[in-house]
Each structure stands twice: as structure tokens, then as C-alpha cells.
Image (cartoon, rainbow, N blue to C red):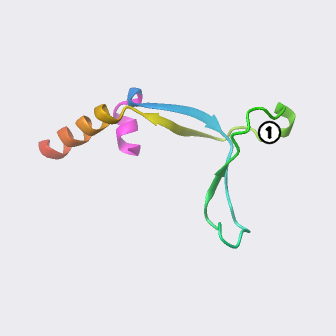
Amino acid sequence: MAVALCVDRTLFKTDRFHVDVETRGELTVGQTVTDRRFWLEEVYRAKPNVNVCVDVEGKRFLKLFMDRLVRS
């Protein structure tokens, strides 16, 4: 999907979020964490640092994927 995003950005909807990697949890080390509590006042939210894919046009993505796979 990362390559597909470079080929056709219109396949995806992205939003800006602050994403962090958990480094201290016993069960969650290495997991990415995103706080999506938009209702928090802005002063309490971390600044967005990455674009996160929140939706994909699945049928169009699969068509692109299969077309490229068969073509090669």
C-alpha cells in the first residue's frame, strides 16, 4: 500500500495525527500509539507528526495491485 500511495494518492484518505512508539509497556513495547481524542482542548494534544491512512478505496487498490502484478 505504501507503493500504491506513491503511484496514486487518490486511492487513500489520510489525516494528520501525533503518533508515538511505546517503549515502556510490558505488553505493548514497539506498538505505535495514536491519540484520537479530538474533543480534548488543543493545548492538551500533542502536535501531529505524521500522515495516517484512515481509508482506502479497496476495489481500486486491488485493481491497481492486480494490474501491476499481472503486467510484470
The residue shown at (58%, 32%) is: 15
Above or below, 57 relative to 46: above
Above or below, 22 relative to 15: below
Percent coordinates x, y for residue 67 in the rendering: 18, 38
The residue shown at (40%, 37%) is: 5
The residue shown at (65%, 39%) is: 17
Percent coordinates x, y for residue 9 in the rendering: 41, 30
7 on left or right of 52:
left
Please state the total of marks drawn on the protein image. Answer: 1
Amino acid at dot 1: Arg
Residue furthest to the bottom: 26
Residue 39 is drawn in which quadrant? top right
53 on left or right of 6:
right
Magenta run includes residue 67: no
Which quarter of the rendered picture does the N terminus lie within? top left
32 on left or right of 24:
left
Q: Nearer the viewer, residue 35 or 70?
A: 35
Residue 37 is drawn in which quadrant? top right
Magenta: predominant secondary structure element? helix
Residue furthest to the top: 10
Percent coordinates x, y for residue 62 in the rendering: 27, 39
Badge 1, how many Cα within 10 Å: few under 14, some, many 20+? some
SS for dot 1: loop
Residue at the spot of label 1: 45
Percent coordinates x, y for residue 42 in the rendering: 82, 32
Query: Which stretch appears magenta?
Result: 1-9
Above or below, 66 relative to 21: above
The residue shown at (38%, 30%) is: 11
Residue furthest to the left: 71
